[in-house]
């Protein structure tokens, strides 16, 4: 899990997410279409599968933040991560490059909208869980998968 800052503001969390997304998104958009189905190092996924995985975790995070915002409670686990990742990988084969690009942008927008609706003091609730979940599924996640986008 990415380390949250001591007392970040919503503005700071949005800035960090946007910086990570801007760089990651530019790299993704620059990938030639024929590179989307090449395997990424180590896990046997293709870039298409990995990028759909990013989209799915944006969605999961947005739903979890909405639950937190509406209830004040830490949301239940979204389920088994391996199962979620396997479904994201399988679903990727049904999506075109254009669909994945559009869905990545839309899912990121939904995640940001949930962050924007939080108050600064909510970010430190539950041991700073809101900051950690955003970090893990935005800037930390993009950095984790940056090497997967490198041309061989």
Image: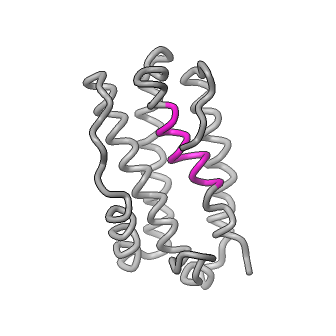
Magenta stretch, residue numbers: 131-143
Residue shown at 40%/72% (left/top)? Answer: 89
Assign the magenta stretch its main secondary structure: helix
Measured as percent of width and height from the top left, residue 28 is found at: 62, 65
Q: In this picture, is 125 found above or below 135?
A: above
Magenta highlight on residue 132? yes
Measured as percent of width and height from the top left, residue 37 is found at: 54, 83
Residue farthest to the top?
Answer: 121
Q: In this picture, is 95 found above or below 119?
A: below
Nearest the camera: 29 or 120? 120
Residue shown at 55%/40% (left/top)? Answer: 135
- Left or right: 110, with 2 as reference point: left
Residue shown at 72%/71% (left/top)? Answer: 150
Q: How many labels does the image show?
A: 0
- Left or right: 68, with 32 as reference point: left
The C terminus - image quarter: bottom right
Here the colouring is one colour
Measured as percent of width and height from the top left, residue 117 is found at: 41, 25
């Amino acid at each position: 899990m990415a380390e949250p800052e001591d007392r970040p503001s919503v503005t700071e969390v949005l800035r960090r997410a946007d910086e990570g997304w801007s760089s990651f998104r530019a790299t993704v958009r620059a990938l030639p279409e024929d590179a989307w189905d090449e395997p990424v190092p180590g896990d046997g996924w293709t870039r298409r599968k990995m990028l759909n995985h990013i989209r799915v975790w944006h969605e999961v995070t947005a739903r979890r933040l909405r639950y937190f915002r509406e209830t004040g409670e830490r949301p239940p686990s979204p389920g088994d991560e391996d199962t979620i990742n396997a479904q994201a990988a399988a679903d990727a084969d049904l999506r075109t490059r254009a669909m994945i690009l559009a869905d990545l942008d839309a899912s990121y927008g939904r995640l940001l909208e949930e962050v924007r609706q939080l108050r600064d003091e909510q970010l430190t609730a539950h041991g700073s869980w809101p900051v950690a979940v955003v970090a893990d599924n935005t800037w930390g996640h993009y950095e984790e998968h940056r090497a997967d986008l490198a041309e061989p």
